[in-house]
Image (cartoon, helix red, strand yellow):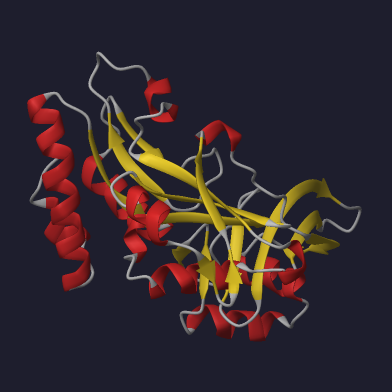
Amino acid sequence: MDRKSIEKIAQSPEDRLLLAKLWDKINAGMTKNIPASTCFLSPRELEMARFLFGQPEGLYAFGGYEDAERKMLIYLPEYLEENTLWASDSPCVCLRAVFYQGDALTHRDFLGALMGAGIGRETVGDICVDKGSCDFFVTAEIAPYLLQSFTGAGRTKVRLSRIPLDQARIPEPETREIRDTLASLRLDSVAAAGFRIGRGLASRYITSGKASVDGLPCEKPDKPVAEGAKISIRGLGKIRLHQINGTTKKDRISVVIHRYV
């Protein structure tokens, strides 16, 4: 851990400011040997934080459930067990909004309503919408305000309550399975198969800065893609390289790709 690394890692003044805030909070906790936590971070921000902090003992990336995309950095001193992350006094809180199922609210509806209520994006983690309810994760500091004031999304009334983290309902995303064979596991090749476009077009999307792999921007069409990786292309959506099944008789790679719908 070295604060001077911020200058090497940051790619913009905004990055520099964020990393400095993360450093101040986590380093203060480590120095005083007390719990410390940050705001919610995007996958790209988490990757920058990983380069800044490394993997020190007691530092966790936690978003309320195992596969959360947006996560907080939480430092726990050695006298606290990891299950403290899930306790009632965790810095990460889950709120459940219940609404009339026929209104079919979306992620965008809830995010817009929260931002409209003056909530900073950094205080909100993942938003998991199900039929008739939405479980979303926020910082413990902002939870009381929301419980008192958040009453609707769009024109739909909601009833808000706090629930234990281990009771959060995380709906399975709807996907369409695509089976194909590829000459290689290059990013442009996997993207072309998953989005059903030509490899040349996939390459142009990538080099123009519209693609990300596991939340991190990537402009290299030849980047190798690992099993389980999620690929997003702005304007096309998101896919996941679900399974690599080995090679065919023609020496092509058999894959299963899930496209999110």
Q: Against 11, is 208 above or below? A: below
For residue 219, say whether it is visible.
no
Residue that extends furthest to the right in the rendered view of this protein? 249
Q: Which quarter shows the C terminus?
A: bottom right
For residue 81, say whether it is visible.
yes
As drawn, is 46 to the left or to the right of 30?
right
As drawn, is 237 to the left or to the right of 234?
right
Res 32 → quadrant: top left
Residue that extends furthest to the top in the rendered view of this protein? 79
> Image point 80% across, 46% down: which residue?
246
Compare residues 81 and 249 and report the one nearer the observer: 81
Compare residues 79 and 254 and report the one nearer the observer: 79
Residue 132 at x, y percent in the picture: 71, 57
Compare residues 117 and 25 and report the one nearer the observer: 117
Total residue callouts: 0
Residue 210 at x, y percent in the picture: 51, 79
Q: Which quarter shows the N terminus?
A: top left
> Image point 25% across, 13% down: which residue?
79
Q: Against 162, is 97 above or below? A: below
Residue 39 at x, y percent in the picture: 29, 51
> Image point 30% across, 36% down: which residue?
74
As drawn, is 135 to the left or to the right of 101?
left
Residue 184 at x, y percent in the picture: 70, 61
> Image point 50% across, 52% down: which residue?
69
Compare residues 253 and 115 and report the one nearer the observer: 115
